[in-house]
Amino acid sequence: MGGGASSSKLNDIDNDIAAKEQNAVLAVAVEEFTEQAYLDGSKTDGLKLILSNPEGRKAFIKFLNTENGGENYKFFQDMEKIRKSKEADLAEEAKATVASYQKPAVVADEGVTDQVSANIESILANKEKAAPEGEAPKEAPKEGEAPAAVPTDDQAKAAEEDVLMQAMFNATNETMVIIALNVFPNFIGSQAYKDWREEEARVAAAKGEAGAADGNAESAATVNSTSSTAVVPSESATDSFANKSAQFINPGSVGRIFSNGSWIGAFVTAAEGLPICVTLADADPKNPNFPLLYVNKVFENTTQYPRERIRGTNCKFLQGPKTEPESIALLSNALANQQPVKVAITNYRADKQPFKNLLAMKPVFDLDGRYCYVVGVQFDISAPGSNAKAMKLVESLISLLPNVVPSGGGF
């Protein structure tokens, strides 16, 4: 019997090794999905999410410091130097800095560019700042009323300096944003970006090993996977996307999702920092109705539902009075028949406001053909003209994801 047990253990080890190798191949598709989502999604949201990650922030700074001989990073340093200059030196330093840099190769939005130009012109001309938007102009005093106090010379000078400083802050902030957004596509796929993504993958793999160990040791204490109780992050949790995503996954499912370098774990890790809505639902028959295992930060922002509140529920909570019955039927049939689906549907945010949602879902199976997960990608297409672009993007993105997960990422 001992020999049989040893043989079984060796077989399990061989299976784990094979699963890791298969997941490593499939994880390449996840990286392709991630890069395309950053390039074709909102660049503003993508940049903000990456900069919210400490290692992502370091990678972006590293890229700025190496791209184009470090000129991009030098520009940011020069602009920061201007922000800290004395009021009397601002105009000349701003003029010299602007003159020393050419227009970015990628043309930014004209409205934003014009605003930056207007702010710089205002600084150089030392013009007065207009009343803030929505603030009514001051009226002349009515008969019998005392006139407003006339500011002293010192007060007037201080007010002029405040206007100048605010205009300078506006100009430098907007210019920095334009430069950052212009170089952002070049950052995606750069060596600095790849190094950062590899580190995220390493943390995700470690999360899988820890989750599997915890699951084996504490299976009796694990809450049911449909529980909506918030997960308390451990003291050792970092700000990596792997750890952030795992905080919103039931502890009993962490090992399943992340173990053996599962591409599902890589997918969830990447999704935490993507500028698109991403969901992962459980297709295990033991947990009926496709409860949500994970939704990303952008899904939370778009729907306004806190992730802790909706974990373990299914997406029916997004439906409302104007949700189309035919769209619901398409989704229900696809889920029941284990088929991919793409549908436009009217959903509702937490504040009961409707929005048009373009949803694509894809079933994921294990190597034995068992139904394991449903991955979803969603876009808010409420804005006029957004439908066609989102339709093309969602088709492209969902097609990149694998539909098979090796052992270690399934049941």
Image (cartoon, grey):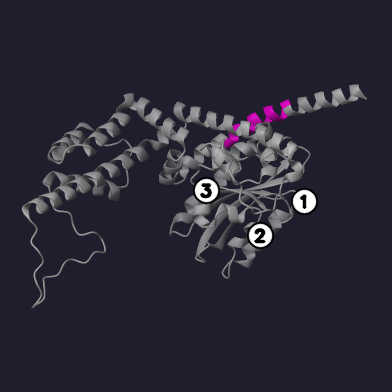
Q: Position of residue 59 (x, y in %)?
A: 43, 30
Left or right? Give the position of 5 relative to 397. Answer: right
Residues at circles 3 and 1 in contact by the CB criterion of under 8 Å? no
Is residue 394 a member of the stretch shown in magenta?
no
For marks 2 and 3, give the CA distance. 26 Å
Is the magenta region chiefly helix, strand or loop? helix
Q: Which mark is residue 285?
A: 1
Magenta segment, which residues? 17-30
In the rendered structure, find residue 297 and report the number of the disc placed on it.
3
In front here: 129 or 270?
129
Q: Picture coordinates of residue 34 (x, y %)?
A: 53, 38
Residue 22 placement (x, y as % from top left): 68, 30
Query: Which sits earlier in the primary sequence, circle 2 or circle 3?
Result: 3
The disc labelled 3 sits on which kind of residue?
A: Lys
The image shows residue 100, relative to residue 150, as above or below, that is above
Q: Quadrant of residue 142?
A: bottom left
Secondary structure at badge 2 equals: helix
Of 48 and 42, which appears nearest the observer? 48
Mark 2 residue crowding within 10 angstroms, few (<14) / some (14–19) / many (20+):
few
Q: Residue at x 53, y 52 (%)?
A: 299
Q: Amino acid at mark 1?
A: Pro
Instruction: Compare residues 104 and 231 and report the one nearer the observer.
Output: 231
Q: Secondary structure at mark 1?
A: loop
**How many numbered marks are there?**
3
Give the residue pinned by disc 2.
330
**Which is in the foreground here, disc 2 or disc 3?**
3
Q: Which residue ends up furthest to the top in the rendered image?
A: 3
Task: Using a 10 Å C-alpha cutoff, classify the residue at mark 1 as few (fewer than 14 neighbours), some (14 to 19) or many (20 or more).
Answer: few
